[in-house]
Amino acid sequence: MEEYTRIWKQILEEISKKVAAVSYDMWFSKLEPLDISFGKIILVTNLNSIKDTLSKPIYRDKIMESIKTIDNPMVTDFTIINEDEKKEYLSKLNTNTVIEDSSQYNAPKFNEAYTFDNFVVGSSNNTAKSAAFSVAQNPGNSFNPLFIYGGVGLGKTHILHAIGNYVLSQNKNANIIYATTEQFVNDFIESMRNNKVSDKVFNFREKYRKADILMLDDVQFLIGKESSQEALFHTFNDLYQNKKQIVLTSDRHPRELRDLEERLKSRFQSGLTADISTPDLETRIAILQKKAYQKNFNISKNIIYFIAEKITSNIREIEGALSKVIFYCQLNNKDCADDLNLVMQALKDDLDVSTHVLSLDTITDAVCAYYNITKDEIKGAKKTKNIAEARQIDIYLINDMLSVPLMSIGNYLGNRDHSTIIYARDKVTDQLKTDNRIKMVVKDIRNMIEKN
Ligand code: ADP
Ligand code: MG
């Protein structure tokens, strides 16, 4: 069975848990997987109605959630195409494919999108990336083993695939084994089913001990699996003695791997351990810029800044947020993301509650109603006393209630610059200390907003 068929089956199974049986039968089960390309699984349907339906946010989200659940690094996104697009895709594929030696079966395949070039470097991941690159250039002779650890969604799997892609680009015959720890454990259990030296035992040894490079992802899952730990210990020693490269990842430092055999822990630490931490604001911005560029989508600076400020947990979430924003813009026929309200709508599930109940518009509508002016006026250039005051109060309230970046507030209110926004915010903050009328106004408007 082709890899994409197998992966699609897993995704479908997850989908079936999330949607009603009728929609599953009518829409999802009708899709045929065609290929995996740059982390996207390509799905084909001959009915445009299916394509249209499944492109709606609620169905799209179900597919994305399911992809996330199976957590296979080869597939992180999907695209649905029709028969004509399929023909086009296949003809392009044929012209690009160099016919290779077909005896080279089971060639390792890495996600083509996970390369060193596509990896944005910042202080949070600099060491891990440099160490990995050095290992890729000089496998077995650099840091051995290389142990990379850090939280979920921070780029560990990306780095392993980058090593794979790089080494293969230098030597297409290199025997690189990438396995999730789950796969390793399964392979081992499978090999033990027969306790005589069967084909399967042979296959396990053959597979893992013949590797030029062994990459084992998420070794924290070895905890509690004693015989697999033992198998890894022997595999490790064998490879190490033969100067073969070993790269491991985990969600924590080796010494934090409680209940893991001591001898394995000490092996894990005998080369280089490098951590990846959560990216700082600059790195998050750089990642968003790079991904938006790769997706060929225009996103205004303040939207990039907004997403980078709001989504801080990990890079997978940042990517997910960006995809949602792009998707919403496309649904609304916009070829550029510059509308903060639309972005907030797209990200309503990802932003914290206070942000998603309120929006720039709800606050501004209340302020306009209170001062009896229009939205165009508050966003416009007029500086009559009434409008200017309304605008300042609006800025104050948005800043206070939404915590969106000042730049975004300025952008929303008719492209006013940053210093105007700071001035208004500070002015109202001061007035609130001394001016009872302003105090009342702010209190009344807050009440109006909260009742909404
Ligand atoms: P982990 O294995 O640590 O859970 P992944 O390697 O799966 O995380 O990364 C999650 C997503 O974030 C992937 O799509 C990956 O390409 C992306 N990503 C992570 N770090 C970076 C980075 N520094 N630059 C660009 N993309 C990154
Ligand atoms: Mg991973």
Image (tube, rainbow, N blue to C red):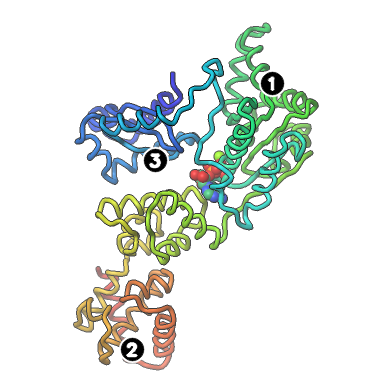
At label 3, the amino acid type is Glu
Q: Secondary structure at mark 1?
A: loop
Mark 2–mark 3 distance (CA, rounded to whole Å): 47 Å
Can you say which quadrant of the picture contains the C terminus? bottom left
Which residue is pictured at 28% across the width and 69% down the height? 361
At label 2, the amino acid type is Ile
Which residue is pictured at 52% across the width and 51% down the height? 314
Q: Are marks 2 and 3 in contact (CB under 8 Å)?
A: no
Q: Tell me: residue 261, above or below residue 387.
A: above
Q: Tell me: residue 189, above or below residue 265.
A: above
Q: Badge 2 is on which residue? A: 438
Task: Give the number of the mark in front: 2 or 3.
Answer: 3
Q: Badge 1 is on which residue? A: 210
Query: Which image quadrant is residue 425 in?
Result: bottom left
Label whose residue precedes the other's in the sequence (3 or 1): 3
Label count reads 3
- Callout 2: 10 Å neighbours few (<14), some, many (20+)? some
Residue 70 placement (x, y as % from top left): 46, 34
Residue 405 placement (x, y as % from top left): 43, 70
Q: Which mark is residue 65?
A: 3
Task: Give the number of the mark in front: 1 or 2.
Answer: 1
Q: Tell me: residue 110, above or below residue 208.
A: below
